[in-house]
Amino acid sequence: MAIDYLTQVQLWLGAYFLLSSWSWLWRYNRFFKITETTLIGATAGYYFVQAVKNINDIAIGGLLIGRYWQIVPLLLGITLFFRYVKSYAWIQRYGFSYLIAATSIITFRALIVTQVTQQYTAMLRSISLDNPTLIMNSLITVVFTTTVIMYFLFTEKLSSGMPGYKVINTIGRYAFLLALGYYLGITVMTRIAFILDRLQYLFFQVLQLPIV
Amino acid sequence: MSTVTRKYIPMAIMIFIAIILFVDYFFETPPSYKQVSQEVQNFNIIIAAFALILGNARILELQGKKLMKREPEQWPFSLLMIGVMVTVMAVGLIFGSASFQLNWLYATLFQQPSASVFSLIGWVIFYAVYLSFRIDNRQMLFFTIIWFFAMMGNAPIGGAIWDGFPAIQSWIELVPNTAATRGYYIANTLSATVIGFRTLLGRTSMGMGE
Amino acid sequence: MSLLDKLIDIPENYIYLILAVILIVSTFVPIGLPVPITDQTRKYFNDIEALPPGSVILVPFDPSPGTEMEIGLSSHIVMKHLFRKDFILVFVSISLPAPPLFESTLKDENLWDKYQQYYGTRYVWLGYISGAETAAAALSSSITKTLLVDYYGNNLKDMPIFQNIEGAKDFDVVVCVNSQATLSVSWMNQWAVPYKLPLYVNPMASVAGTFWPYIEAGQMTAMLVGAKAAAGYEILYGEPGRATSGMDAQSLGHLYLIALVVISNILFQLKKSRGRD
């Protein structure tokens, strides 16, 4: 009984949040601001709970079973809060330097392999001269990949003296425009899906209309 | 001394971490070294959790100031934000992260508003496209043609109208789009790697939190 | 202001109103357009179907609440498929909204009882781990050295499932159910590529185009792209559901957008020609 009541409250609050969000399409108003504020507060609160759980399970749990080196991340994590102590604010650099270094290196070391070397190898492996269609595809692949790289890495000021620069720049620009146009075209389905999800929630869960 | 503690020690930490992680990834290392590298990565999980909590502190700081100053039109919303945040935190800490109570709060106050606010993107894109897709040069014409074939190939109705739409969309997807995206990834990664090394070597001071 | 200027600068409310009417009508009056099943969807389904019983699968569950219709639906049907067979499933997340959505997905698809029955022996839920890609990297080296307990506080070393599993080298497949784009790439970078594991992803349609280089390079094995692929997967699985029902509205929404662009350009060119006159 209590759970049914809570489910009903949840449904009607969900309907309020939905309609107040969509009221923004008319104009920015207080109902939307209430929804926006609630969302930010709930997000922050929930993130806090999960963060504390991680610290408790991994670091404090580790300390309790004899992994004494877990004191290091606890101390480094606490240094992040020294931003609020004016004269010792520089201490936060220790925590941030660890965070930035570890996060960026773990990502970069993998990206060099997955986004550069393996992608380049895949481009070369995709080249095929079996028939005219494959030859055309291979030519497009090599030309577009190379010109887009050069379009991004070489700016006009540095490269305007390079022979063929204008052609390379133009092809690179059009190749990237193609990727962007394609991306925008297929993204429409995602955007409509966001609206449909809410409409289905409103009609079939809140208003309990029969599903067609 | 202050330069050493404020600049060189943080830089030394960054370089030390970088060397440990790079060597472990690209070279064969003994098990003891792998254990050190494992713990370096594990430490980051905890520090990242503290960074999440820092976000909460920041919200309390900013919204708290507005509340204390009784900023007109804003302070009730600051009160609401802090109230909701503290409520969710308290419920989570008291009942546990896997509790029914926290899940209910999550579903009601986070999941529903989040999905609803997200859905605004869907509406806005229609007006944005109406305003911006006005062809007045070759680049815009080219962009719009590609966009059209991508749309018609992707929608189920495109295949029902003409078989060619899905075929053209598929070709664009597999050949020129893949090539251009690949070029973008390679350029992007090379640029980001250079910026990353500049940060490690202290050539930029961004991201240290001050 | 002339009629032409009024139409060119039409207030957005009219555009939203027409869109709302189109989507609502198509939701209640389905046209019944056929849903094409792509090669990627077939490959994804057939590969999962062909996996031998006892396969050890890492299932990253990294949702975002607003994406239920796009990748949530594909996550539901893929979860059903994974639970139908006798796999060993290790669920984990590096996305904060995951824990309640994970449990609600299992309950919505009537998988909760089976999940609880075999928990610890065939299934385990590690919960949310902070750090994003660094968490994925740490887990790939060793799950039991990174984490001490699962999401519910049970000691990992006491669980039968972790007697033979330590890190990525002990897994057969990675199936990224309900993952945001950047997080799928994180799992690719830290699990699939270094340990040469097949990786299956469920991206939104908007980012699928950016995943094709990974598919072509063999870094990702197959992908289930958005609601359309979820509809196709439901058909292959034999249970058409919510994903299939949204396709008509999608089609009409697309046609409406094209009509808007055509009208906008006609009006724009008319205004330009009148300006020249």
Image: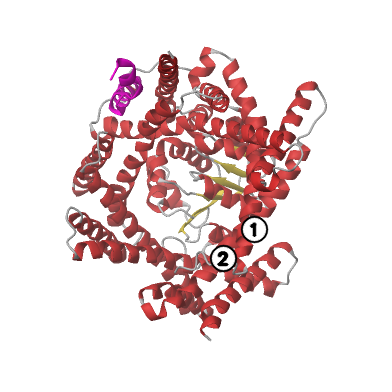
Residue at image position (46%, 30%) is A188
Look at the image and give the residue range highlighted in magenta.
C1-26
Residue B115 shows up from this direction: yes
| Res. B15 image quadrant | bottom right
Residue sticking out furthest to the bottom: B1
Judge from the rendering whether residue C264 lies leftward or rightward of residue C205; answer left or right. Answer: left
Q: Amino acid at mark 1?
A: Val
Return the residue found at the far front.
C277
* Residue type pointed to by label 2: Thr
Q: Residues within 10 Å of mark 2 (few under 14, many from 20)?
A: few
- Asked whether the residues under marks 2 and 1 belong to the same chain, the reply is yes
Q: Residue at x 34, y 16 (%)?
A: C4
In the foreground, B66 or B151 = B66
Q: Secondary structure at mark 2?
A: loop
Which residue matches tag 1?
B194
In space, the residues marked 2 and 1 are separated at their CA atoms by: 12 Å
Q: Is A141 situated above or below B162?
A: below
Q: Is residue C140 magenta?
A: no
- Pointer 2 residue: B204
Q: The C terminus of chain B appears in which quarter of the rendering?
A: bottom left
